[in-house]
């Protein structure tokens, strides 16, 4: 039921943020902060009249204060994503992902916001010897992006211990679903696969395609963000936001071809620098402490996503 609480979503015009915004408008007032660098106002099209939209860059600390003032919860999703982008062009991602995160946390602490939920990344784990990846493992970041996202976690935890701001960090594991932008070479692999499948063209697979990911449907992630904002006894902590599954790129591309009844052999290319080999989340802590309950199977998630791209493209 809607109440008077104000929720701020940084990166709210992005793929994951815009899904979360749709959940939050049922619960209270929603203000979106986005600089529209990788997000799009079109992602908020049918909910635009129900939210406040602020075209603000999180590098601009002073501009954050008036928006964050009076917020109950800040969902901090604004970031420059992508491992290869952070390698090719490290300065903007460093500034947004580290300095920007600091600015958001500081504004939230100053405004006495009740809680900040921070979008961290599974890339922080790097190549662990053991799967699934558990929150207690030592992080071994392999790229600037992984370092940046990990640093945000540390800052979130320190803002809790030093300033009393409640924070919860969620390590997102390869999120996919409707509204993921497939137009950049840095786009998430499943959005690129969808684009190629619909165009009946071959995607590029970097490496041998046997690298695996815990692909997690965006609605399940949005659900967990909400749960993380409400759970008791979790302030200052970090949790995996994954599905607990593991699929190779070859498996997913085979599945998609079967779904469409086509045969499109991928173009194989050299592995990407900074790429993690295998990824699979241990979901036990998030289930125990946050009530995490991912519901969408990979088949169902791919079907829904494909349906969306078919209509959108
Ligand atoms: C990382 C994080 C993820 C999230 C994301 C944000 C890991 C394991 N995951 O995702 O949690 O934070 O960053 O950007 O670190 N690939 C192809 N062909 C393409 C594009 C990608 O083969 O056209 C491969 C790529 O080399 C990688 C896999 O697909 O092995 C996934 O790449 P991605 O860019 O979708 O996401 P990833 O795993 O870097």
Image (cartoon, rainbow, N blue to C red):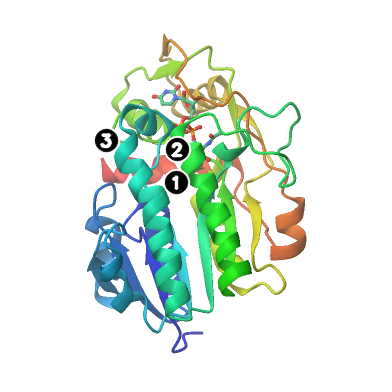
Please, is residue 169 above or below residue 162 in the view? above
Q: Are marks 3 and 2 in contact (CB under 8 Å)?
A: no
The residue beneath circle 1 is: 177
Toward the viewer: 88 or 253? 88
Tag of residue 145: 2
Q: Earlier in the sequence, mark 3 or mark 2?
A: 2
Q: Residue at the location (40% across, 71% down)? A: 107
Instruction: Classify mark 2: helix, strand or loop.
Output: helix
Instruction: Classify mark 1: helix, strand or loop.
Output: loop
Separation of disc 1 and disc 2 at Cα? 22 Å
Tell me the quarter of the image containing the C terminus: top left
Separation of disc 3 and disc 2 at Cα? 20 Å
Instruction: Classify mark 3: helix, strand or loop.
Output: loop
Q: Earlier in the sequence, mark 1 or mark 3?
A: 1
Please, is residue 223 above or below residue 98 in the view? below
Q: Residue at the location (25% across, 53% down)? A: 40
Find the residue positioned furthest to the bottom. 4
Tag of residue 256: none
Q: Residues within 10 Å of mark 3 (few under 14, many from 20)?
A: few
Q: Quadrant of residue 141?
A: top right
Residue 51: percent from the left, percent from the top?
30, 75
Q: Quadrant of residue 144?
A: top left
Quick check: 178 left or right of 142?
A: left
> Is any part of residue 240 visible from this angle?
yes
> Does the Cβ of the disc 2 residue fall within 8 Å of ligand 1?
yes
Residue 127: percent from the left, percent from the top?
64, 27
Q: Residue at the location (50% across, 52% down)? A: 152
Toward the viewer: 199 or 278? 278
Q: Earlier in the sequence, mark 1 or mark 2?
A: 2
The residue beneath circle 3 is: 183
Q: Residue at the location (44% across, 73% down)? A: 108
């Amino acid at each position: 039921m809607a109440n008077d609480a104000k929720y701020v979503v940084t990166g709210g015009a992005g793929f994951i943020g815009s899904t979360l915004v749709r959940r939050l408008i049922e619960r209270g007032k929603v203000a979106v902060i986005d600089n529209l660098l990788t997000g799009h106002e079109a992602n908020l099209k049918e909910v635009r009249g129900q939210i406040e939209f602020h075209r603000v860059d999180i590098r601009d600390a002073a501009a954050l204060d008036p928006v964050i003032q009076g917020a109950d919860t800040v969902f901090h999703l604004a970031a420059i994503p992508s491992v290869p982008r952070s390698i090719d062009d490290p300065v903007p991602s460093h500034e947004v992902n580290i300095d920007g995160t600091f600015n958001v946390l500081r504004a939230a602490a100053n405004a006495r916001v009740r809680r900040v939920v921070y979008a961290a990344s599974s890339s922080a784990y790097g190549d662990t010897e053991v799967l699934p990846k558990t929150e207690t493992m030592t992080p071994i970041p392999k790229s600037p992006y992984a370092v940046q996202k990990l640093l945000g976690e540390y800052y979130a935890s320190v803002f809790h211990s030093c300033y009393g701001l409640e924070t919860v960090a969620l390590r997102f594991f390869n999120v996919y679903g409707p509204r993921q932008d497939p137009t950049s070479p840095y786009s998430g692999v499943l959005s690129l696969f969808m684009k190629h499948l619909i165009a009946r063209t071959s995607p590029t697979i970097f490496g041998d395609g046997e690298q695996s990911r815990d692909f997690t449907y965006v609605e399940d992630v949005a659900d967990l963000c909400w749960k993380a904002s409400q759970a008791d006894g979790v302030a200052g902590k970090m949790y995996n936001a994954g599905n607990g599954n593991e699929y190779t790129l070859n498996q997913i591309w085979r599945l998609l071809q079967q779904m469409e009844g086509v045969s499109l052999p991928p173009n194989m290319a050299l592995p990407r620098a900074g790429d993690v080999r295998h990824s699979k989340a241990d979901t036990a802590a998030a289930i125990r402490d946050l009530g995490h309950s991912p519901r969408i199977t990979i088949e169902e998630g791919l079907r829904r996503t494909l349906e969306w791209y078919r209509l959108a493209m």
